[in-house]
Image: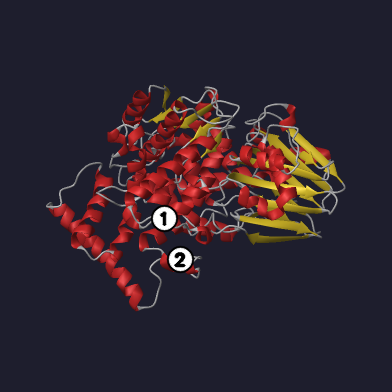
Amino acid sequence: MCGIFGAVNIKISEEKALYCLNQLQHRGPDGYGLWQKEGVTLGHRRLAILDLSENGKQPMSYANERYWLVFNGEIYNFIEIRKELMEKGYSFQSESDSEVILAAFIEWKEECQDKFNGMWAFAVWDQEEKKLFMSRDRFGVKPLYYAEMPDGGLVFASEMKSIAPIFDQIEPDMEAFTLYRSQVHYENQEKCIIKGIRRFPAGSCGWFVDGKIHVKRWWNTLDHLMEVPADYEKQVEIFREMFLDACKIRMRSDVTIGTALSGGLDSSAAICAMSHIAENGGTGRMAEDWQHAYVACFPGTSLDESAYARKVTDYLGIESTFLELEDTVSPEELYRYIYEFEELYTNMQVPMIKIYEQERKYGTLVSIDGHGADELFGGYSFDIVKALPDVENKDEKNAIVKTYMDMNCDGDVSMDSEEFKRTRNQLQKDIVFRQKIKKLLGRPAVKSAYANHPAWKELDNLNKTLFVSTHETILPTLLRNYDRTSMINGIEIRMPFMDYRLVQFAFSIGWRSKVRNGFSKNIIRDAIAPFMPEDIAYRKGKIGFNAPILDWIKGPYREMFLDITSSQEYRNSSLVKNPQATRTLLENVLQGKTGFHEASMVWDELQIFMWEQVFLKGKFSKNLS
């Protein structure tokens, strides 16, 4: 896990190359490497996770220095691939997964990607044929950006800030800001908020040859759906086996492992599976020290889930660190976070950054977390109701509505209550009626870029909705966010739910395996319940991991935000859509006239101004250089 930087067909001084590379120092605090030859630059900032010796350093070469690699990520099944390659006559000088990538690329070329179970962004330079191969993992867990230069050169890096110094001037891309504001597939398209920089697509690879880059899709989940038994109990067994193996190979590490534990189902499932694996013999290269749970606490707020997390740690009997995150950070630190995060998001990322900061402080460098389960298996109440149009049976429809309400109420809702009847009727009107109208008008029930794929037509409405959430809207953004908030602190996140086998499985089962018996994500609950506290496995309520932005605006950020919105710079900003409207909204929040949603809208606009100050105006540049 690291940060990578590279340039081809561009002459860059060693000083300039190191400056670009060191914009990624937070991603790789354990050292750096730089290789330059004949207009090619490859740079690497290292976070040492596997093979901590000098043998694991990058840029890494193979085959008498013909091939050179820079790589960010982890190949979890590298031990198995290494063994296969050794049987073919390959030898290895390190115990790293990086060297396995090089040998696999030589043996299988593009098809090596199909062998890999992991998360990655890597580039291989062929010094003999003078061409560059680039690859990004199936779901875009690890970031990769690039810029094509006017003179036929290419620059690429793990973050935009590493590419930006190559430009004569940094300019915002206004179309990208429009996409961000509308929340329309922003992270799933190539356009970025810095003009001239493009996002390398997830599940894609490309060759840069003779001054041109040729990018193509190498992975589409719909091409890899599975045959699964119709019997639900057998599906549970398959899921359990896959999930345990996904966790097992993610426990391979030469450094300490832990978990960011919320007390919800997903992160609890991850750490309970880890405990079960350790009790049953583990696996080769499994980290010896893994029993660390880090729990974010928001005392006195509705966001606090520490009581649930404590049930899990007490059940497992493992070390736990409860971190009170009610405090904000200084204005200077907030600007630094905006620079290092470099993208925009409607939810302030301070709590997420702070919990991974604490993990590193206490010596944990790898965090195995539960991200991805909601999008794959129906963890959001607003998604599961999309199953309603596929159901004719009244009792089954009522069960879906009840599940929806239970998730929002953190408990059981009576089907006889007037509130239940009102909600059911409204959902019927909003969801079912709209779908019927769309059908009559010949419009798709769920819009997707994948809608022309033959397998798409076989998905039910809920799975279509979840597929879009997983591949096009919600999850790509969350994967980016967690990459940034962890790597700001030099922490690697591993996500067992994002194992490609589980993703294939998730869209090969019907909605009734996900919303069942009054529960969402039912197949996860039934599969992992034997290893975890029952009241956590079958807990109905859900609390998102968000910053208490309403409390923070009214409290510690009050003066800062008032100062910003009253400044001339703010009123003259080219990126702020309506300065006076945001100022008025802020005043309404401070006076208690509005709530959390409006507070989030205030942050949406203020962070854009702060981003402009950092990236375009050079504010706090001395702190950020």
Q: In which quarter of the image is residue 436?
A: bottom left
Which amino acid, mark 2?
Answer: Trp
Mark 1 and mark 2 lie on one chain; the one further toward the N terminus is 1
Q: Nearer the viewer, residue 354 or 111?
A: 111
Residue sitting at x 61%, y 52%: 114
Q: Decide: marks 1, 2 in contact (CB < 8 A)?
A: no
Camera-near label (1 vs 2) is 1
Q: Is mark 1 on a helix, strand or loop?
A: loop
State the separation of the CA atoms marked 1 and 2: 17 Å
Q: Is mark 2 on a helix, strand or loop?
A: helix
Residue that sits furthest to the bottom in the current view: 441
Decide if residue 56 is on the left or right side of residue 127: left
Decide if residue 172 is on the left or right side of residue 450: right
* Mark 2 neighbour class, 10 Å CA radius: few under 14, some 14 to 19, many 20 or more: some
**Quadrant including the C terminus:** top right
Q: Inspect this view and state whether residue 607 appears.
A: no
Colouring method of the image: secondary structure
Q: Residue 7 carries which label?
A: none
* Residue 96: percent from left, percent from top: 68, 34
Residue that sits furthest to the front in the current view: 87
Q: In which quarter of the image is residue 14?
A: top right
Instruction: Give the labeled residue for mark 2.
Output: 456
Q: Inspect this view and state whether residue 154 appears.
A: yes
Q: Nearer the viewer, residue 479 or 495?
A: 495
Which amino acid, mark 1?
Answer: Val
Instruction: Give the labeled residue for mark 1.
Output: 228
* Mark 1 neighbour class, 10 Å CA radius: few under 14, some 14 to 19, many 20 or more: few
* Residue 251: percent from left, percent from top: 53, 32
**Quadrant including the N terminus:** top right
* Residue 53: percent from left, percent from top: 71, 26
Residue sitting at x 31%, y 55%: 512
